[in-house]
Image (cartoon, rainbow, N blue to C red):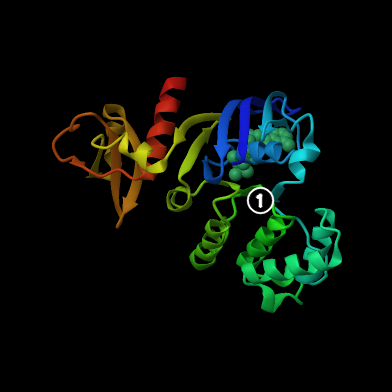
Amino acid sequence: MNTLRINNLTKTYPNGVKALNGISLEITNGMFGLLGANGAGKSSLMRTIATLQEPTSGSISFNNVNIIEKPNNVRKHLGYLPQEFGVYPKISAEKLLDHLAVLKGVLNKKERKEQVTALLQQVNLYQHRKKSVFTFSGGMRQRFGIAQALLGNPQIIIVDEPTAGLDPEESNRFLNLLSEIGENVIVILSTHIVEDVRNLCPKMAILSNGEIISVGNPKELVASIDGKIWTKIIPKKDITIYKKAFDIISTKLVAGETQIRVLSDQKPEEGFEKIRPNLEDFYFTTVFQQESKNQ
Ligand SMILES: Nc1ncnc2c1ncn2[C@@H]1O[C@H](COP(=O)(O)OP(=O)(O)OP(=O)(O)O)[C@@H](O)[C@H]1O
């Protein structure tokens, strides 16, 4: 079993932005979802775990080795799919993967060839292996990205917002691939898409303004607000009145009408209906409670 321990991690950038503020987490094998809005600090945390930047304070250990002091130890076992890959050289996908495998330390030519071929097949890009990655669609690029992250049989795989910009079919294919990668490694999926976490991750955390505001199993977290979420369709113009009177966690347009969701132990007033909460409701509830506390 692999264990990643993050203890009281902070990151303040030179411009004064405090992107991480006292993060503590323990992550073991399986898929771990890190959910947060844009700017919550997800990429900062991912880059710090990937040893691409140092924290301001705090510690991270992988299998009891301090990776801030000994970054090479985790780099050997790490696969990272960043949010932005940057530019791709104009060589074939197969050659690029082979080159990246050398950088990952797979020096034996025969072993490298086997790994590259197996990975291209696994991500369903073998038939496109002679094409340049820069000619690939978004979904194909992400699948190539996961292939390069899997080089060298990593024990920790970090994927940062992997489905942003993919159409639903490509996104589905990518996520299925990710879930196949196995239960024997740590996979950290950073995303703002609640659905991806609900479908894939037995454990998750919510990051907000650089702080972990909730950790647990998605089903259990949702169960913790069961019976407390109420919904009502209201005239759009009344939204300010409702906001003053109730704890509105989210507002949605449903078939052109405004639907509000309210957090309350009892029925807020006539016309409200109790609903079975989902993970999105839990996410909004947690963020709402955190914001109320900070006000
Ligand atoms: N290199 C940097 N220098 C200064 N500020 C930064 C740097 N990188 C990130 N930030 C700031 O730190 C905060 C957290 O950013 P981060 O990219 O980690 O969030 P995120 O949750 O990954 O969001 P997104 O999905 O938009 O990337 C933001 O306020 C961002 O502007």
Q: Do we see residue 295 in this rendering?
A: no
Q: Give the SS element for disc 1.
A: loop
Q: Can you name the residue that lies furthest to the left here? A: 270
Nearest to the observer: residue 107 or residue 45: 107
Q: Which of 87 and 24 is in front in this view?
A: 24
The residue at which mark 1 appears reads as 83
Q: In which quarter of the image is residue 224?
A: top left
Q: Residue at (80%, 53%) from the top-left corner?
A: 104
Q: In this view, does 164 lie above or below 224?
A: below
Ligand 1 visible in quadrant: top right
The image quadrant where one finds the N terminus is top right
Q: Quadrant of the C terminus?
A: top left
Q: Residues within 10 Å of mark 1 (few under 14, many from 20)?
A: some
Name the side, left or right, on which 4 lies relative to 90.
left
Does label 1 point to a residue whose CB lies under 8 Å from ligand 1? yes
Residue 26 percent location from the top left of the image: 56, 32
Q: Which amino acid does label 1 sit on?
A: Gln
Q: Which residue is drawn at 62% across and 30% down?
A: 6
In the picture, measured across the screen, residue 250 lies left or right of residue 10, that is: left
In this picture, residue 106 sits left or right of residue 119: right
Residue 194 in percent (x, y) is at: 45, 47
Residue farthest toward the front in the current orientation of the protein: 1
